Image (tube, grey):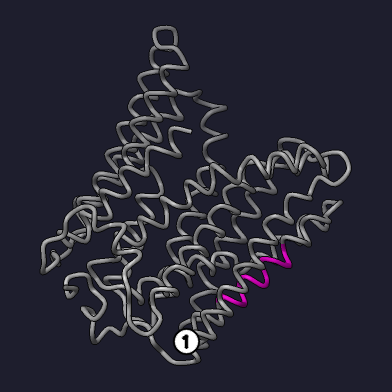
Amino acid sequence: MLKECLPVISLLIAGYCRDRFGRNLPIFIFSACGQLLGTIVLVISAFYPKGISVYVTVVVESVITGLGGSFPLLLMTAACYISQRSTAEDRTSRMSWIMASYLIGMTIGFFLSGMILQRFGFMGLFTTSLVLAAIVLLYFCIFIREVPMPAKKSMPIWIVIKTVFRKRENHLRPIVFLMIVVHCLFGTALRCEANVFMFFLRKSIGLDPTKTGIYSSYRSIILSISTFIVIPVLSKYFKIKDVILGIMCASLNCASAIWTAFARNTTELFLCPLGDLLRGGVYAVEKSIVTKCVGTNETGQVISAEYVIEAVCHIVVLPLYTYVFNVTATSFPGAFFFISAVFSFITIIIFCITQFVTKDKEVFMSDKDPERYSSSSEE
């Protein structure tokens, strides 16, 4: 719970600071330091297993990592950094690489963590994490270079909420609202599914822990490769419009969720991830659209607001997933996937509304007028 709530504070402050001072690097470093310090706590606990209780370790690590923003802050900053360094034409494909990299990292971590834990114990596992966190911090310090683009006008910190809700030209305000909803639906479904998915594999298919691990890795690999390759190809080379691509991705996600819910044997289960080939596309499309709707000095505030609202949604919706699974565990273990299917169906409707509002016209901000919707130009 601490890791869900505490990043909210860092996200709001970081989103404001990013837009006020026009810099991403300090936020990257702050996020990496939070992860590094949290991992140091785990290493110390593993080194003195009898001197520090597990409860104290968990609380201290959660507080440090949570205040450091955890993964939401890193993903938010990455989205801001890429949007600032990409054209409107290639932004969707580049945004897909964020989700692909996240999934690839999760897959590699899943593989290595079990092997390291079995061979070297918790000390070896946490030390490896510490080394990787240090490498990330060094990478940010050495390789990330940027020219500060501060806001032209003073921005009080309470402008964060005002930025999300303020009026915009060409119906862009409702589009921003709709994309925030899409982000919350996608992120909430993804995280809630992950919380009960292992139990589903054991109850529905009867997989043992080893096969469960193999399947989870296989599923992550399929999602990673498809997000890294398929989405950029469709967006950049086939020139499919963002909204149309969003409808395609959400439709396939909806069908895949229903398909997975009815899976009852290993063959059906291993075919299910093929229906998730475009799952990461929802994230890429939504981020691409929202960064085209807001100004350069608003991106951090709007994206941070997305992750804050998603954190609240996750806390509220997770009990629903857990309740549905517990009630139907023996009769229909995959019933909770229907919740995800409903979320995907709502996403389809949202993208259709966006398509209707834009009326096939490119009303999103172009690269030629980056200050058009910026808060710096607002009275």
Q: Horizontal and vertical percent for residue 48?
A: 39, 12
Disc 1: CA contacts within 10 A as few (<14), some (14-19) or many (>=20): some
Residue 66 drawn above or below residue 287 = above
Q: Is residue 174 left or right of residue 81?
A: right
User: Toward which corner of the image does residue 338 lie, by quadrant?
Assistant: bottom right
Q: Is residue 281 left or right of residue 80?
A: right
Q: Is residue 157 left or right of residue 173?
A: left
User: Toward which corner of the image does residue 292 lie, by quadrant?
Assistant: bottom left
Q: Horizontal and vertical percent for residue 109?
A: 50, 43
**Looking at the image, can residue 93 be seen?**
no
Q: Residue at x 45, y 58 (%)?
A: 101
Q: Label 1, on which residue?
A: 358
User: What SS does tag 1 mark?
Assistant: helix
What amino acid does circle 1 point to? Thr
Q: Residue at x 78, y 39 (%)?
A: 202
Position of the C terminus, as image quadrant, is bottom left
Q: Residue at x 44, y 23 (%)?
A: 58
Per the picture, the main secondary structure of the magenta-coloured stretch is: helix
